[in-house]
Amino acid sequence: MKNVSYIDRPNRPLFVYAVLFLAFLYVPVLFLPLFSFNDSQYIAFPIENWTLRWYRDMANNEPMLAALMNSIRVGAVASILSTFLGIFGAKAVTRYRIPGQEPIIAVIMAPLVIPGIILGVALLILINRAGITLSLYTVTLGHILVCVPFAMATLMTRFEGFDKSMEEASADLGENAWWTFWRVTLPMVFPGVLASLLLCFTISFDEFILAFFLGGTDPTLPLYMWGQLRFPQRLPNVLAMGACILLISFFVVFFSQWLVRRDPDSPKSAG
Amino acid sequence: MTTKQSFITIDGVSKHFGDVIAVDNVSIDIEQGEFFSLLGPSGCGKTTLLRMLAGFESTTSGEIYLDGKAMSEIPPHQRPTNMVFQNYAIFPHLDVSGNIAYGLRKDKLGKVEQTRRVDEALEMVKLPGYGKRRAHELSGGQLQRIALARALVKRPKVLLLDEPLGALDKKLREEMQLELRALQESVGITFIFVTHDQEEALTLSDRVAVMARGEVLQMASPQQLYNRPFNVEVADFIGQMNFFDAEVMDLQDDEALLDVQGLGQLKASAEGEFVQKGASIVVALRPEKLLLSEKGDAGDENTVKGELSTSAYLGSRSHFFVAVDGCEEPIEVAGQDAGFGAGESLQRGGEVWLSWARESLVLLPVT
């Protein structure tokens, strides 16, 4: 017998399964950047010539850049406000004994399970009735609604993960609730805050249904890309943009994972 | 409000959590500079009482006075107490200096003075030069010292310690006990120390309150607690003890004639009102007050014959268990005599004699 522990013994079928699984997940996604370098409007093999012109075009494509900026603005505002609400919500439900706590959490988490299309229609009716003009603001509002549960979930684990005696120690050392929050609570949940910001931004950035229902004349990027699919000659531009977003997403996720791992008192990295 | 004489007065304090009574009408007076321990098994209310002193729990009824001031309306951050938490609660996002200086923000000391105070505190807990370390780089014993430094740098009137040595290994714990005692004597601050470890409480304290079910069973010096416990529960909790059912046959002046199960008829000095003629009582004897020998005098009333059943080797000493006719449980005896070969010559099942001094008998009421 080789000196390998039972758990480390190679398992060929499992290895093949893992490779197939990863291929199934990522190969379709990788076609997107691949064809963004294709010097033809048609997505078909074999690729005859390689080019960077779609990327150059993209840089000059004003409407697309405008849509990108819209998405970034909506994502930034939605993620910051959702995280802000999430911090206080998570602190409230993890730190205080509130009557009716379970139903409150259920109501806050409900948008997670309500189908987007239902939420979209409902909000559209409401906003129309209220006489509010559809714009990026209404999209942002809709995004906050769907982002808050994610922010809450992310931050609640963080709040639950750290010992209440830390806050008591701060009070014991002479700081009132306000200063305790700034000097102890917030720094300790900060990795969670960052994770929540990134998560909410990602969710808002590729959200389609609510943006479709609640958007005014300014499209967000997913809406714009959807619109472009009707014109075959513009498809390569969309592919180039998609490739860029893929690359940026990869770095964002990588960065957030690195943050979580670097943090010594994170529940995930704990021993 | 009446002016209170003691430095700390816990006056009829109760704490209810719903239907559960955690602390039940407890009154304690503690003097300035005293090392006072709250001792009891888990769930006896000692930690709740400590947390009420710190202000983390409100009192259901009763009042706590600290230096003459009623505390119930004063929030934790305004109380002149500081606490060493059971898990130390060292802030992981700050280094050691940051932790120790945490409570000094409002004192507006200026950078130089603050650094001096922090260094002084580190010096005091014997960790000079550790200021730049982080919590995760420190051992349990070091964290413990930092927690002490962080609380003492505030110069509190009272230091509250919630089982601070519980997480340390035995050797380190004994070391820290000595240091803690020395530290308390040098700073002169009142320490209130919560522990479930009776040895620790006896080693450290000027006075100990033994608690159970939210009540104080006995409050006394370690010597009194050990030698003159109030009742069976305290006697059982503090150290090892042999108990015998007994009946008071006769009472003359301060001397009682007892009929003790297994030990026969004995005379003992009658202390306590429960010692009445005809009353059932409990007689207690510490294992180390018993002398084990192979020969004995059957005529001596403070001697009894038995049979060695088992022995337990504890390193520095051995404990022998001796079965005596009339006793349900074997009597525990500490093998204290080195000349006796720590009992090696004794055979299991062999005949042995136990003897004791009359003053070693402790009379306790039946619970």
Image (tube, coloured by chain):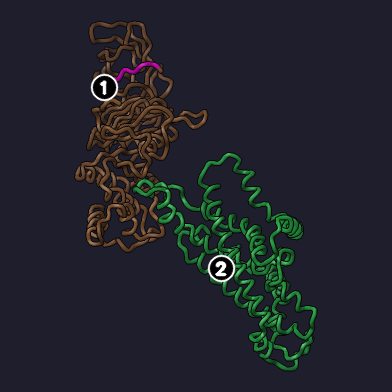
In the image, residue A45 lies at what x, y percent? Answer: 78, 87
Image quarter for residue B364? top left
A103 relative position to B179: left or right = right
Furthest residue in direction left, as rendered: B186
* One can see residue B145 in this view: no
User: Which one is in front in this view, the residue at disc 1 or the one at disc 2?
Assistant: 1
Front one among B229 and A52: A52
The answer to whether residue A229 is above or below residue B270 is below
Quadrant that contains the C terminus of chain B: top left
Q: Circle 1 marks a residue in which chain?
A: B
Q: Which chain is green?
A: A
For the point 47% across and 28% down, which residue is it? Answer: B21
Front one among B241 and A100: A100
Image quarter for residue A64? bottom right
Which residue is labeled 2 in the image?
A3
Residue B360 numbered mark, or none: 1
For the point 26% across and 41% down, which residue is it? Answer: B157
Secondary element under disc 2, as helix, strand or loop, is loop
Amino acid identity at mark 2: Asn
Colour of chain B in the rendered structure image = brown
Q: Which residues are magenta?
A: B362-366
The CA distance from mark 1 to mark 2 is: 64 Å
Q: Circle 2 marks a residue in which chain?
A: A
For the point 52% across and 61% down, which residue is it? Answer: A193
Furthest residue in direction front, as rendered: A131
